[in-house]
Image (cartoon, grey):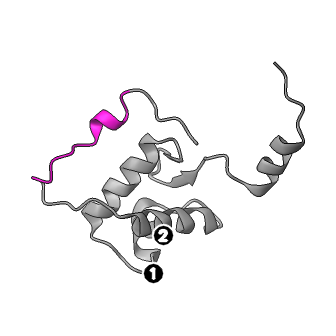
Amino acid sequence: MTPIRKGAMASLKLSSAEGAHWPNLQTLLMIESAIKSAETPPMRTELWKSLPRRPMYQTFKRAIDYLDASGKIMIDRKDRVVWVAADSPKLKALFKKAVRVR
């Protein structure tokens, strides 16, 4: 599990006064899958347009903010979304074989 950066989640507002919806689990998984399967890091709007089931853009932005705050993605200066979470099968297999140091 990726630790959440201190204070990063505080920037996500819990009120729905803005009219934006909170993304559900299916939406988050769809966005994660699209980011992971992209050959080159897509721009935020390109990613939104490439989703098979397109959520409202405000909901999409909240999902991106959550993934960024939880350390799963990074957004570069050109507004491209890059997957940075360490969850590849090769890395997991490497951790299983590694010698544990106390």
Residue 27: quadrant of the picture:
bottom left
Q: Quadrant of the N terminus?
A: top right
Where is residue 80 shown, x and y percent of the image?
49, 54
Residue at 50% over, 54% down: 81
Check disc 2 and give the amino acid type: Met
Residue at 41% over, 75% down: 49
Helix, strand or loop under label 2:
helix
Give the distance between the C-alpha atoms of the residues marked 2 and 1, in whole angstroms. 8 Å
Sort mark 1 into few (<14), some (14-19) or many (20+) by Cα contacts within 10 Å.
Answer: few
* Residue segment shown in magenta: 7-17
Q: Nearer the viewer, residue 36 or 80?
A: 36
Q: Is residue 10 above or below residue 68?
A: above
Where is residue 2 shown, x and y percent of the image?
56, 40
Q: Quadrant of the C terminus?
A: top right
In magenta segment, residue 10:
yes
Q: Nearer the viewer, residue 92 or 62?
A: 92
Check disc 1 and give the amino acid type: Pro
Most distant residue in the left direction: 17
Helix, strand or loop under label 1:
loop
Q: Main secondary structure of the magenta part?
A: loop
Q: Which residue is mark 1?
A: 52
Where is residue 84 shown, x and y percent of the image?
61, 47
**Image position of 28 (left or right of 1):** left
Most distant residue in the top direction: 102
Most distant residue in the bottom direction: 52
Q: Is residue 10 above or below residue 34?
A: above
Q: Are marks 2 and 1 in contact (CB under 8 Å)?
A: yes
Q: Tag 1 or tag 2, which sits nearer the N-term? A: 2
Mark identifier at residue 30? 2
Residue at 15% over, 48% down: 15
Mark identifier at residue 21? none
Mark 2 or 1: in front is: 2
